[in-house]
Image: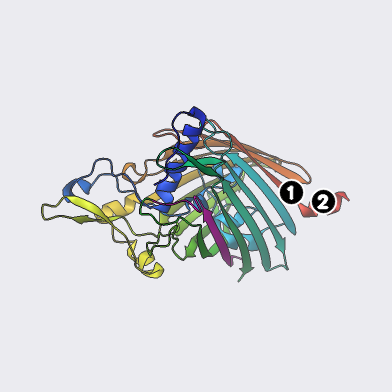
Amino acid sequence: MIHLPLNQMKLNQKSIVFILIFFFTANGVFAQGGIKSKESLLGQRNVITTAAPFLLISPDSRGASMGDLGVATSADANSIHWNPSKLAFIEGDGGISLSAAPWLRQLVPDVWFYYLSGYKRLDKQSTVAMSLRYFTLGEIQFTDQVGTSTGNYEPKEFALDGAYARKLSENLSLGIALRFVFSDLARGQVGGSGTEIKAGIAGAGDASMTYKNDLEIGGRDYDFSIGGNISNIGNKITYTTEANRDFIPVNLRLGTFWKTQIDEFNEIGLGVDFNKLLVPTPQYEYDSSGNITGRVIDDGPLIQGMLTSFGDAPGGFKEEMKEITISVGLEYWYAKQFALRAGYFHEAETKGARKYATFGAGLKYKVFQIDASYLQPFSRRHPLQNTIRFSLLFDLDAFKNQK
């Protein structure tokens, strides 16, 4: 077991952060709010947990300011996260984006999430892209059971992506992405069972599609997109030498985005995304009296777990529907240079209870665009509350024209 000193307040706060993240990822266990029996489980908290949850963090301020929405919005350098197939419709020849966000800034000063992405158009039908996300938990001091320091360590996770998107027609595109995931939370330490903790490694991929068209409603023209992306289809991760492995967050995202030109200068768009983890719902072992005695570790293959995730919730169809999160977002542009954004994210009480509003703005100049976002939680604290996030996007075409 990992022990940390309690006589240093600042270190203790960081220790709590690390323990929470390690607990939820390496062990895949969730405290069930006092659930003790099979009967009391129904309708109570039964949250799906995975390894490497950082893969689902919204990396850019534009998507984050619209309630974590982005599967069908217009393409930019960050599309590889939301929906790689959108890149086939991107207007520019190439671009780069950089984002950085402090994580839990009210508790610790050096936990950060970084994201770097870029794309290059190959021809009128094809685009390639790459991205790197890096999540650092700062420096942690580990101690043994009697409080003796065993050294400092910097837990970290990162993912390196490559993507390809191609138009199949003027309205339809497909995209794929490949991903290498490295999750290093406590390498070299010894766990509670006496086994050495190691870094978790996974390979994963995305499969995505985008459909774009326009139509007229009530005398007004609308451009609309429909997008879908199954992300992080990959092997399970283990943090020990034991056989127990945890799913990474295989995720299904479906959504649509509609926009219309109000007049020469004003444009407005509205969209909605639906997300569902394609990971088995936690199952439990029971004694003869129906009391929960432990959690069943899912050792089934990846595809089986993805398929069974649509119908394995103990509460049946009603609980399955609660495993879907909803993001609603609004984006307004003035003269294609200044943007205002707002959104809302909703998750069921029994599946995590995340509910928050988001706000943001964007400013586009000749060679770059800067976006900012802010999050206001409603039901529970959020790692990004009271934090303004920024993203910078650079248009390589504009650089050439400037030169």
- 215 is within the stretch colored magenta: no
Q: Nearer the viewer, residue 72 or 322?
A: 322
x 80%, y 51%: residue: 398
Image spot of residue 82 (x, y percent): 55, 55
Q: Nearer the viewer, residue 126 or 283?
A: 283
Image spot of residue 83 (x, y percent): 56, 58
Q: SS for tag 1?
A: strand
Task: Give the residues in magenta.
Answer: 169-191
Question: Callout 1: 10 Å neighbours few (<14), some, many (20+)?
Answer: many
x 49%, y 57%: residue: 198
- 190 is within the stretch colored magenta: yes
Identified by mark 1, the residue type is Phe
Sequence order check: which comes first, mark 2 or mark 1?
1
Identified by mark 2, the residue type is Phe
Please give the residue where the numbered disc 1 appears in the rendered image: 394
Q: Identify the disc placed on residue 399.
A: 2
Image spot of residue 147 (x, y percent): 44, 37
Image spot of residue 168 (x, y percent): 60, 71
Marks 2 and 1 close (CB-CB < 8 Å): yes
Q: Quadrant of residue 252?
A: bottom left
The tally of labels here is 2
C-alpha separation, residue under disc 2 versus residue under disc 1: 8 Å
